[in-house]
Image (tube, helix red, strand yellow):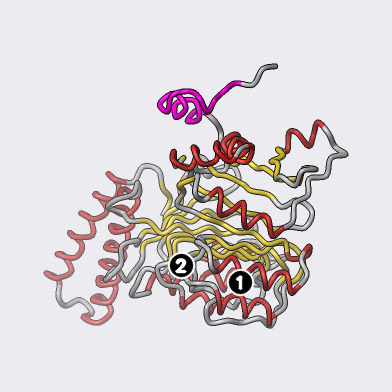
Amino acid sequence: MKKFPILKIPDIVFREVTSMMTPIEIIKLALSDFKMELWLQHQKYKILGICFVLTKEHPEVVTQTCYGYEDDGFLSVMFETTEDNKIKPITLEELDEEPSRIPRVPLEELFSIYSRLTRIFLCPSHGWELQLDQLELSEFREYTERILTSEIHEFTVRGGSITNELLAELMDKLPENVELEIYSDIPLDYSHAKALKFRSVDYLKAGWLKIEDLFSIRNMPRIKLRLTNFNCRDVNKFLLYWSDCDKDMMKFIEFGLKQGVETNKQEIFKNLTVISQHRPTYFYDIFYVKARNMENRKFVVGKLLISTTEIKLSACDPFNEDVSNEYSILELVHQKRDCEEKIRKMEKEFQGLGDAEKRKLRSELEELEAKLSALNHNYTI
């Protein structure tokens, strides 16, 4: 088949044709010809993210083109060195068609590919993933140093076990505006002042964290602690601290309970006022709680998703997110309980005196109950 002379077509046509290509097709085109690469650099194609995976077996590049976790939003490509020492991209589909094919490229070459691709793609997120169990310790340190000289938004370590020394070294060097993910085993005696200070964190093994460690969290977008040693009493302690904290702690936090422990909602919500949704999702029961301390805070409504072994808490702004009705109900519930407490206290202290004040409080209580009844159609208090 005769090759299509794409470099000879008008610039506007070239831009239109390549704009319909996937990022992987753009990468293939760029690495096929030096002149083609230069042309593509002028176009500056926009994607959401690009991640470079450093592994001895199959180093690869993963591109993100849409939000969420749809399979077609993440496209992956690996590389092999041809006989004339050129770098050729290989997709997973091509590997499936030829299982015996083993794509290999020196890891050092992936840094060169990074430099070339970042001149072609404009994206807000540059990520790096290191496969710990496939790298020598010296290689891990060397590649980390190289990565830290580049633009970096996400840093992931996957596989094997990471020592206290190596993880401390890593946390000391990484900037706090990085999203950190550690999917390797972490020793139970690990501790570090920056462990919960990054832009976001995701620890597969978080048994080394105590619930009190979470009290230092401030203004973090996302925290995931997948396997912990927390029990229901710990969760209650955290929720009480979140409710009384004088600053926003985080936008989202997720943690799994200690192995063998199941959620006990009565223990989790002790000394808290919550409302529950009548129609739970298939996997989670849904609850809402309002922060007691609302000064200097924006995200004061907590939406909790609770399964048998897992808790997810989203902190919401009632004035800019779809929780205004829940906020109003919780506000009325708090006011109603405050009013009831005042009546009980007055009856105990005055023993029949202060009837006018009591009538006023009872009238206020009836008014709050009427408002609550009119507003609340979907929740159990």
Q: Residue at x 75, y 33 (%)?
A: 94
Q: Which residues are magenta?
A: 4-20
* Residue 336 picture quarter: bottom left
Task: Tell me residue 17's x, y (percent).
Answer: 49, 25
Outermost residue on the top side: it is: 1
User: Image check: 357 left or right of 46?
Assistant: left
Mark 2 or mark 1: which comes first in sequence?
A: 1
Whether residue 174 is visible to the viewer of this picture, yes or no, is yes
Marks 2 and 1, how far apart at CA: 17 Å
Task: Tell me residue 104's x, y (percent).
Answer: 78, 49
* Quadrant of the rendering where the C terminus is positioned: bottom left
Answer yes or no: do the residues labelled 2 and 1 have beta carbons within 8 Å?
A: no
Q: Amino acid at mark 2?
A: Asn
Outermost residue on the right side: it is: 100
| Mark 2, residue position | 177
Task: Tell me residue 225's x, y (percent).
Answer: 60, 65
Above/below status of 97 relative to 207? above
Tag 2's secondary structure? loop
Residue 116 in magenta stretch: no
* Residue 308 picture quarter: bottom right
Question: Predominant secondary structure in magenta?
Answer: helix
Residue 14 in magenta stretch: yes
| Mark 1, residue position | 145
Q: Amino acid at mark 1?
A: Glu
